[in-house]
Image (cartoon, grey):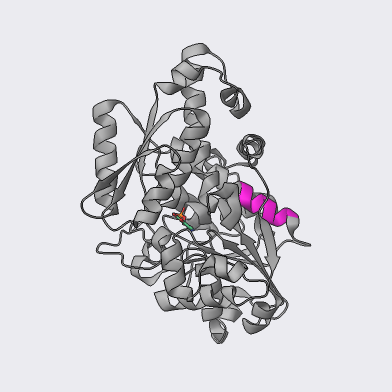
Amino acid sequence: MIANPNVDRTAPYADGRRETILSGSAFEIARREIRSWPGFAETALRSLPTLAAETGVGALYYKDEGSRFGLGSFKALGGAYAVLRLLQKIVGKATGETPGSADFMAGSHADLRAGVTVTCATDGNHGRSVAWGAQNFGCRCVIYVHETVSQGRVDAIARFGAEVRRVAGNYDDAVRRASADAAAHGWHVLSDTSYEGYVDVPRDVMQGYALMVDEALAAMPAPPSHVFVQGGVGGLAAAVCATLWERFGAARPICVVVEPDAADCLCRSAAAGHPVAVEGALDTIMAGLACGEVSLLAWDILSPGADAFMAIPDDAAAQAMRLLADTVPPVIAGESAVAGLAGLRALRDDAEARRLLGLGDDSVVLLFGTEGATDPDVYRAIVGRSAEALLA
Ligand SMILES: Cc1ncc(COP(=O)(O)O)c(C=O)c1O
């Protein structure tokens, strides 16, 4: 574990810049829109007393995103919201009006929307959300996947009417192809990560994620003392950290960010004090967390806001998936859903880390179970049973 040397717990959330990235007021708009979408339902917050005892904390809560909009992951909140926001801007510019989700779904400005194409590269969950958003809000969608993305994940995207294009090479090759094709055809790239000069879309994506945090806090008897949240590019962790920081200020829960040891760009960036990229295969079962570069907007929040960073091996994630599957009733958690639990378990016997984080038997820990069995074959191979068999 790396205690974040740059964390500043006394700084106010609103520093003139942070609230332009994520804020309670922008969240209110996102919340109103997302809650109006067809099939909206809050996801469950599970209390896990046996695992709390096993990890030496007082209480453990798991926000189970497996059922979100029937898409299998919390990502349903982000990419689809970015589609809506983009279409609102395009229609607003052309007509001076700002229709909401309900107006679009009732057919408002359908001709304008039909001329828009959105695109992104994905290893599964984000692309599924963008495709679903495009289908709901009536625009065209082309999604790029790299060669090792499973056919199951491709099919799950194509189900929402998107054209899925497979690209030779890795995720970064798919990103480059999406961006080159978008530039050539006048399409709109809806990426969940931000880089120099590209901030509006990832900000909207992250603002959508904040709904999950809001729901979790509302369902808890009292705010958590600690949050263990997984990191890919850091957008999810930043949405969690920002929401807690803005609401609770210096008294916010301790925030620990956990990522795969094969893709530990957040840990390395924390140690260096600035974004550091990880090269290479980024080979991990935690497909949604296999990211080599941090999102710049996320980093602006996590660098001063997160208390610690951790990296965990694949077998710790696999064990956490099996433990959750064995819970009564079972919790179906995909490979990228469990890094928080795996991180907490890794600290069980680490007295120094527990002291630094103030983690003990009176702690109340919140985890975000960000996906269900989004790749059923991989899930069965790791857990030994299918999600359907476990729930039967
Ligand atoms: C299931 C799941 N959990 C967590 C994450 C991590 O989110 P972020 O890349 O914003 O850190 C992802 C990203 O794709 C994901 O699919």
**Is 365 left, or right, of 209 in this rendering?**
right
- Left or right position of 207 against 147: right
Above or below, 120 relative to 242: above
Q: How many marks?
A: 0
**What residue is at 61 percent from the left and 60 percent from the top?**
64
- Name the residue located 53 percent from the left edge and 54 percent from the top edge: 72
Is residue 24 or residue 250 the one in the foreground?
A: 24
Above or below: residue 232 compared with residue 103: below
64 displayed left or right of 258? right
Q: Identify the image quadrant of residue 216.
A: bottom right
Q: Image quadrant for the C terminus?
A: bottom right
Q: Position of residue 290 (x, y in %)?
A: 37, 61
| Magenta extent | 211-218
Is residue 148 at least partly visible in the picture?
yes
User: Outermost residue toward the left?
Assistant: 168
Asked if the magenta segment contains residue 221, the reply would be no
| Image location of residue 13, percent across then percent down | 60, 48
Q: Is 364 in front, or is 300? A: 364
Residue at the farthest right position: 221
**The one of 61 and 73 positioned closer to us in this rendering:** 73
Indicate whether 386 appears above or below 131: below
* Residue 11 shows in this picture: no
Secondary structure mostly seen in the magenta stretch: helix
